Image (tube, grey):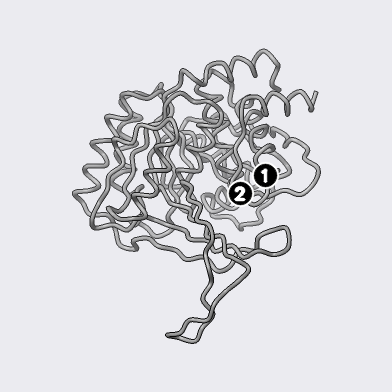
Amino acid sequence: MLTATRLESILSSLPRLTIGLVGDLFLDRYLHLSPHSEVSIESGLEAYQVEKVRNSPGALGTVMNNLAALGVGLLVPTTVIGDDGHGYDLLREVRRLPVDPLHIICSPQRLTPTYTKPLKPAGDAWHELNRFDVRSRLPIADAVQEELCRRLEIVWQSSDGLIVLDQVNETGCGVITDRVRTCLEWLAEQNPRKMIYVDSRQRLSDFNAGVLKGNRAEIARAGNLAANAELAELERAAAVLASRTRRPVYCTLGEQGTLVTEPNGKATMAPACKVTGPIDIVGAGDSATSGIVTALLSGATPLEAAVFGNLVASITIEQLGTTGTASPAQVRERWQSLQ
């Protein structure tokens, strides 16, 4: 499904790509706790002692990490974060990547979305305690939405393609509002040859343009099916979406692989790469996205792109306790091991 020549063609083109992104950018903050604790004089409660703080871009940032590891030349995100300390730390991490941060809007009215994850030592591993979530749970102001759309149009003009990540469950509270979605559809109409790729946790069925991607539950939700819908039902739901958008639809199905449904209704399964040993599937969907998008922008067929996405995801899920990435060398090595 993916020859050595096609693989090298994809990998060699990545440094020349400029990829725009729009969606929800989070800060993932990990607090490594000391095995020793103290008792608070004020409250009498146990006070955990933090011995290390580790920050990483999450959500849209996870996709950017994956794209950077693959060797993409330039990433241009459009998003909204808070004008706060978490935002400062997030921007510092983002600037370590091949990113133009010009269109990251810092709004005093918003909180920077942050997942704080305390990690307690447990033998040779880490045990994750209750997570602390920080984010605004009110709709984005109209003026900020207008500014988002203005900047999005600039990014669209200067990029080879655009990734949309709709992460926040509450309607209107994330970056991908109805207004932004309408803007995306307008951009697609202006240049139908340029790719928009959409990954939406809750609202995939609301998108009328772009290459749509979801996991089993997300495609099922878009088709008003049960979360554990059978493969034949998922194929029909994906076919409806593909017919509407006139673009391929990708459904990631874990160890089964990735179902690729084309606008003519043809559905093909790109088998998953066999992996032995323990795995961690956190971030696997974002890894698949990075592979699919880069392959499509490099001229791959929809099926070849799914195979490339599976290669990337098979590498990242082997990296336990972290949101993994895959380098070109690792992709080549994984491909060779499967021949």
Kindly state the secondary structure of the residue where label 1 is placed.
Answer: loop
Give the left or right position of residue 254, taking residue 91 as reference.
Answer: right
The answer to which quarter of the image holds residue 264 is top right
The residue nearer to you, when weighing 23 against 250, is 23
Q: Position of residue 142 (x, y in %)?
A: 21, 51
Give the left or right position of residue 277, taking residue 198 as reference.
Answer: right
Q: Position of residue 167 (x, y in %)?
A: 45, 51
Query: Which residue carries the number 1 mark?
Result: 319
Mark 2 Cα-neighbour bin, 10 Å: few <14, some 14–19, many ≥20: few
Query: Which residue carries the number 2 mark?
Result: 322
**Kind of residue sitting beneath label 1:** Gln
**Kind of residue sitting beneath label 2:** Thr
Disc 2 and disc 1 in contact, CB within 8 angstroms: yes
The residue nearer to you, when weighing 23 against 278, is 278
Kindly state the secondary structure of the residue where label 2 is placed.
Answer: loop
Q: Residue furthest top?
A: 5
Could you tell me how many numbered marks the image carries? 2
Quarter of the image for the C terminus: give it. Answer: top right
276 lies above or below 156: below
Give the left or right position of residue 207, taking residue 236 as reference.
Answer: left
Q: Which mark is residue 217?
A: none
What's the CA distance linking mark 2 and mark 1?
6 Å
Q: Position of residue 193 (x, y in %)?
A: 41, 21
The residue nearer to you, when weighing 168 against 90, is 90
Q: Residue at x 27, y 31 (%)?
A: 153
39 lies above or below 134: below
Q: Position of residue 96 (x, y in %)?
A: 44, 36
Quarter of the image for the N terminus: give it. Answer: top right
Q: Residue furthest left?
A: 143
Mark 1 Cα-neighbour bin, 10 Å: few <14, some 14–19, many ≥20: some
The answer to which quarter of the image holds residue 122 is bottom right
